[in-house]
């Protein structure tokens, strides 16, 4: 199992590295001292597990997660910020308190070994996105994209309509569109991408546009240009 | 001391109350009894018996009323509730006194109306005289309660203010205790993690680090007792702290100290400089990938101690680090409680690349 250590403190990295040598099935493939280095290494080395510090210069561990398309399994390491991990609704994430207790580390690693590797980290690089780590103010989630009804462009950001939540994603709509599953998501107009699974009814509107009503009550207009494509999709 | 002061004031109040009570009632007795002797030509012994009796009843009833008022703390009641109780109780004791007067008069003079009333209101019917007798008694009690309340309310207000002032002092002391900064747990655990790594890599440095951490912890624990320390002593703490921080920040932290010789012995609030330094590391050095230089400056100008902590400012984070956390706000509040307007803490963010926290306080 490939592991990456992300921590700004050299001593902390060295200590964790040393602790991990007692687990022969863990192979430390790299170390990063900030989230920019970490993102590059995660994308290049595809680690199975990342030991991630929270407070680092240049951005927090949470910031890193929002930038990743495919989030490997994460174990947060922190001296005192575990409240931050607990406060977030990210039960998928484990955390270790520094100084790290060897027994606690063993437990966390066993847990990871037991859970089957998510399709995220091992999937082909160009496979469509299935979930994203999204942060909205003090809260954050792993959002399963099939549960999102509409993506709306807001400047350089994208607003997600996901159940009752309306979190903002730090990406552009265009960049996101390329990574979404084209069988499920449809570019309705310049501003919006809609989830076809949510379509409840379609009405023909003025000058060739289409009015779509979604199951959650949202109304989306499909531009004339896209309407032709939409009809073709519908007849298939 | 406070309790004894309260007891003394209570004794004084009680003495004043009895003096007024006796003077008032004896004047009343003298006026009524001698009036009765002169206007109604009755023997002095009878007038004295009747009015002596009435005055004793009056003293008894008003004293009872006073007991009820203090016992049930009527003075703390809202005005309307107080008024209702006062009116009802005055009417009640007036009626009681009236009935006793009638009975007593009957016993002494064989007439329900005291002869002085009969003499003064001889043109009225018996019923009119009786009503007059009641009104005369009522007005005495109205005067009594008015005098009593004006004194008692004054005293009540004074005591409330005193209590408020004492409460304020207590609160300030509690606030100061709270505001006194503690070592950040984040720092302690990070330092321990660093020590753990050093035990294998550099045992000598690990031993030093343990000593430094122990000293720093002892200093913060002891700081509960002393409010002020010499700058020299505080700087020892800051040195230990910075040595431990450089375990994790390594070459990212560079420290420059510029302390005027005269400032070493100046006394400053304990943990004040430490808080400024901690804040500078947290918001200035730690968020910067390349780190930076921390400058500590202390000098004395016109009997004022000036402490400055200068740190580089991360770009972009500038606007939200202006609020610079609880640490500086607490220090500022603490200075206000200790020195009032004579001291101040200012965070100078006029330069884009650096932040300066400055404290000025009297020596």
Image (cartoon, grey):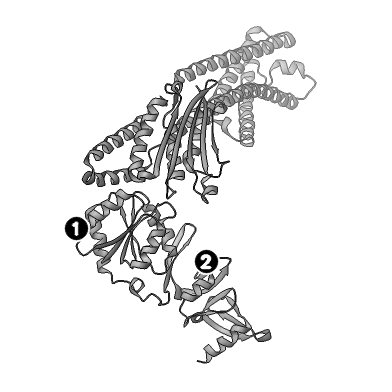
Chain holding disc 2 = A
Query: Could one spot residue B269 in this view of the protein?
Result: yes
Residue B34: image tag: none
| Disc 2 residue crowd, few under 14, some 14–19, many 20+, Cα 10 Å | some
Q: Tell me the residue that label 2 is attached to.
A: A166
| Number of disc labels | 2
Tell me: residue B111, above or below residue B86: above
Tell me: residue B250, above or below residue B102: below
Tell me what residue is drawn at x 38 percent, y 74 percent.
A125
Q: Tell me the residue that label 1 is attached to.
A: A22
Left or right, A52 with respect to B343, comes to: left
Residue A200 image offset from top left, x and y in percent? 54, 82
Tell me: residue B181, above or below residue A217: above
Dot 1: element: loop
Instruction: Pick whichever, A69 or A160, lies toward us.
Output: A69
Image quadrant where one finds the N terminus of chain B? top left
Left or right, A133 with respect to A49, comes to: right
Dot 2: element: loop
Residue A159 image offset from top left, x and y in percent? 54, 68
Left or right, B217 with respect to A68, comes to: left
Query: Could one spot residue B223 in this view of the protein?
Result: no
């Amino acid at each position: 199992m490939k592991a990456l250590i992300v921590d700004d403190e050299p001593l902390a990295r060295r200590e964790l590295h040393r602790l991990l040598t007692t687990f022969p099935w863990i192979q430390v493939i790299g170390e990063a001292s900030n989230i920019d280095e970490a993102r590059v290494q995660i994308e290049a080395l595809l680690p199975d597990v990342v030991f991630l510090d929270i407070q680092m210069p240049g951005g927090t561990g949470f910031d890193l997660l929002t930038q990743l398309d495919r989030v490997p399994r994460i174990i947060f390491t922190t001296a005192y910020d575990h409240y931050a991990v607990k406060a977030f609704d990210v039960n998928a994430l484990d955390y270790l308190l520094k100084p790290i207790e060897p027994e606690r580390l063993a437990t966390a690693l066993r847990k990871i070994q037991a859970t089957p590797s998510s399709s995220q980290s091992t999937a082909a690089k160009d496979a469509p996105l299935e979930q994203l780590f999204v942060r909205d103010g003090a809260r954050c989630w792993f959002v399963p994209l099939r549960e999102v009804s509409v993506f709306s462009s807001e400047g350089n950001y994208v607003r997600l309509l996901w159940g009752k939540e309306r979190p903002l994603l730090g990406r552009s709509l265009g960049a996101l569109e390329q990574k979404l599953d084209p069988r499920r998501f449809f570019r309705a107009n310049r501003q919006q991408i809609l989830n076809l699974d949510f379509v409840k009814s379609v009405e023909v509107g003025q000058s060739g546009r289409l009015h779509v009503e979604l199951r959650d009550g949202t109304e989306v207009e499909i531009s004339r240009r896209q309407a032709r494509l939409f009809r073709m999709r519908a007849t298939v | 001391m406070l309790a004894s002061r309260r007891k003394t004031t209570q004794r004084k109040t009680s003495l004043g109350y009895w003096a007024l009570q006796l003077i008032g009632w004896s004047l009343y007795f003298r006026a009524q009894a001698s009036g009765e002797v002169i206007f109604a030509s009755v023997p002095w012994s009878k007038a004295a018996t009747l009015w002596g009796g009435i005055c004793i009843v009056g003293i008894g009833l008003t004293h009872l009323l006073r007991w009820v008022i203090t016992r049930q703390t009527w003075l703390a009641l809202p005005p309307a509730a107080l008024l209702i109780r006062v009116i009802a109780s005055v009417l009640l004791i007036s009626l009681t006194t009236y009935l006793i007067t009638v009975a007593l008069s009957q016993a002494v003079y064989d007439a329900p109306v005291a002869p002085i009333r009969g003499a003064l209101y001889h043109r009225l019917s018996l019923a009119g005289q009786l009503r007059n007798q009641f009104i005369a008694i009522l007005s005495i009690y109205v005067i009594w309660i008015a005098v009593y309340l004006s004194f008692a309310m004054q005293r009540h207000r004074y005591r409330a203010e005193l209590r408020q002032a004492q409460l304020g002092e207590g609160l300030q002391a509690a606030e100061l205790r709270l505001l006194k900064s503690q070592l950040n747990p984040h720092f302690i655990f990070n330092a321990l993690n660093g020590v753990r790594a050093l035990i294998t890599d550099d045992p000598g440095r690990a031993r030093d680090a343990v000593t430094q951490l122990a000293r720093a912890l002892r200093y913060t624990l002891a700081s509960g007792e002393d409010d002020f320390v010499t700058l020299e002593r505080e700087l020892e703490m800051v040195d230990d702290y910075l040595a431990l921080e450089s375990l994790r920040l390594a070459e990212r932290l560079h420290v420059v100290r510029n302390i005027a010789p005269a400032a070493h012995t100046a006394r400053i609030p304990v943990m004040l400089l430490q808080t400024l330094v901690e804040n500078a590391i947290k918001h200035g050095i730690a968020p910067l990938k390349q780190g930076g230089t921390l400058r500590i400056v202390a000098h004395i100008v016109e009997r004022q101690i000036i402490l400055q902590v200068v740190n580089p400012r991360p770009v972009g984070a500038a606007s939200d680090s202006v609020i610079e956390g609880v640490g500086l706000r607490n220090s500022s509040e603490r200075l206000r409680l200790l020195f009032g307007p004579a001291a101040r803490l200012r965070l100078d963010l006029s330069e884009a690349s650096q932040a300066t926290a400055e404290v000025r306080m009297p020596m």
